[in-house]
Amino acid sequence: MRVRVCVLMAFSILSDFTLAESAEPKRPSLLIGYNEHRTNLPGGRQPNVSTRRAMLVKADGSDRRLLATDLAEESGAWTQFAGWSPDGKTAIIGRGWESLENAKWEEEHKTFRFTSEGWLYDTYLVDVATGRAENVTAVERVSFYNTGVFFWPNDSKKLGFTALIGGNSQPFSMDRDGRNKVDLTKNSNGFAYGFSSSRDGSRISYHENYQVYLADADGSQRVHVQTGQPFNFAPTWSPDGQWVLFVSGEHYNCHPHIVRANGTGLKKLADRAGYRGVTEFLDVPDFHGGSSDTPVWSVDGQSVFYTAKVGNNIELFQVTLAGSSEQLTRSAEGTLHYHLRPSPDGKWIVYGSKRNGVRNLFLMRLKDRDEHRLTDLPPGHAAMHAHWQSVELIE
């Protein structure tokens, strides 16, 4: 009898341990790309921005490491993590450089001055396993300033990006090797930005002079989304291609809106309650005023994540397409959240959070709001712009 009791007790203990172990949140087995930089170096924007480096970390917080370190060896250069290939094997890395003389001029005049002598920004495709880097925007170069590279949905041999030409930013397509660059707004002289493609690759969206436009993939059949507002920014397509999400309103007073793929059915989803929509990424004066903090789609396309002001905090929210909003975080006084992104399976979100003066990355499991710190940086440093590795990764 005693043996049986001991066995039962051992089984009970093992069962309790197994239940407790299984109750622990299992984080996705994916990498997260992001950026780190200094925030408090004297001299303004450039001394801090030039410390920015593209980073990788596992979702459990381990194996944090630099990526493409050789791209930032030149004085005044930095790297920036910008996205992933569909198979999760290739990282999209921006490499920026600015001359000291141009940076000093910008600080004195409190504005950017983009010239080919003072700036160079290219985008590389970096093989994560080998570190091999390809500068795709330097091939058949059309500009000294090329950003926003993304893999075209449903066509792994095609890329999209934006190029600064004659003072105007224009959306382009190009081949995977950087060749055959095509201006998708060649008949327009406006400043176009926020370029994205629908998931089936057949449509594009962008904002030009802060007005949202939808078009076919080749730039034709362009439709101006009529909002009646002067500031419309960062349009992105829903997973099913039926809706486009963007912010609309006045500059620094704009809110999440959606519109149908044909440009009709405009609807305001939520109000950011006084949040300016930018997160300051420096602790010294920055003439540009921070980094845009825009809403993003949920994985199933049935809701939108966004940030809004609550008291002195910037909290995380989720709103359905019907307009039902839920607050996801209730944080300590002075907490500022930013740059939220859902995991590929839709069960987790990664986001930045400034707490006690330091900007770190955090993960949250949505079903129970269980939160985990992903980075643990000291004062004077920041982690931002997190990107989940794609789920099509082949182990």
Image (cartoon, helix red, strand yellow):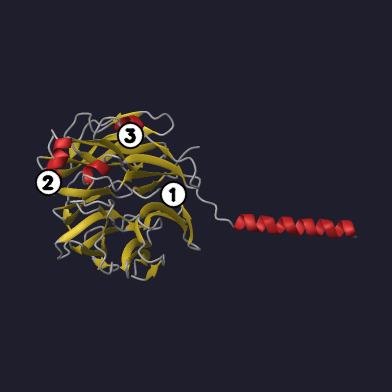
Residue 29 lies left or right of residue 126; in this view the side is: right
Distance from disc 3 to disc 1, alpha carbons, whole Å, reads 28 Å
From where the camera sits, is residue 134 visible? yes
Q: Are marks 1 and 2 in contact (CB under 8 Å)?
A: no
Q: Which comes sooner in the sequence, label 3 or label 1?
A: 3
The picture places residue 345, in percent across and down from the top left corner, at 46, 52
The picture places residue 321, in percent across and down from the top left corner, at 34, 66
Vertical side of 148 occupied by 338: above or below: below
Q: Which comes sooner in the sequence, label 2 or label 3?
A: 2
Q: Quadrant of residue 253?
A: bottom left
Q: What residue is shown at x 9% (from left), y 40% (from top)?
A: 166
Q: Which mark is residue 207?
A: none
Q: Nearer the viewer, mark 3 or mark 1?
A: 1
Quadrant for the N terminus in the image: bottom right
Q: What residue is shown at x 23% (from left), y 35% (from top)?
A: 76
From where the camera sits, is residue 161 visible? no
Q: Quadrant of residue 87?
A: top left
Q: As shown in the figure, which amino acid type bears the numbered disc 2?
A: Glu
Quickly name the residue at label 1. Answer: 376
The picture places residue 305, in percent across and down from the top left corner, at 36, 61
Distance from disc 1 to disc 2, alpha carbons, whole Å, reads 34 Å
The picture places residue 338, in percent across and down from the top left corner, at 34, 57
Q: Are marks 3 and 1 in contact (CB under 8 Å)?
A: no
**Total numbered badges shown on the rendered structure:** 3
Mark 2, residues whose alpha carbon is within 10 Å: few (<14), some, or many (≥20)? Answer: few
Q: Which mark is residue 108?
A: 2
Mark 1, residues whose alpha carbon is within 10 Å: few (<14), some, or many (≥20)? Answer: some
Q: As shown in the figure, which amino acid type bears the numbered disc 3?
A: Leu
Quickly name the residue at label 3. Answer: 125
Q: Nearer the viewer, residue 266 or 1?
A: 1
Q: What residue is shown at x 37% (from left), y 28% (from top)?
A: 132
Q: Nearer the viewer, mark 2 or mark 3?
A: 2
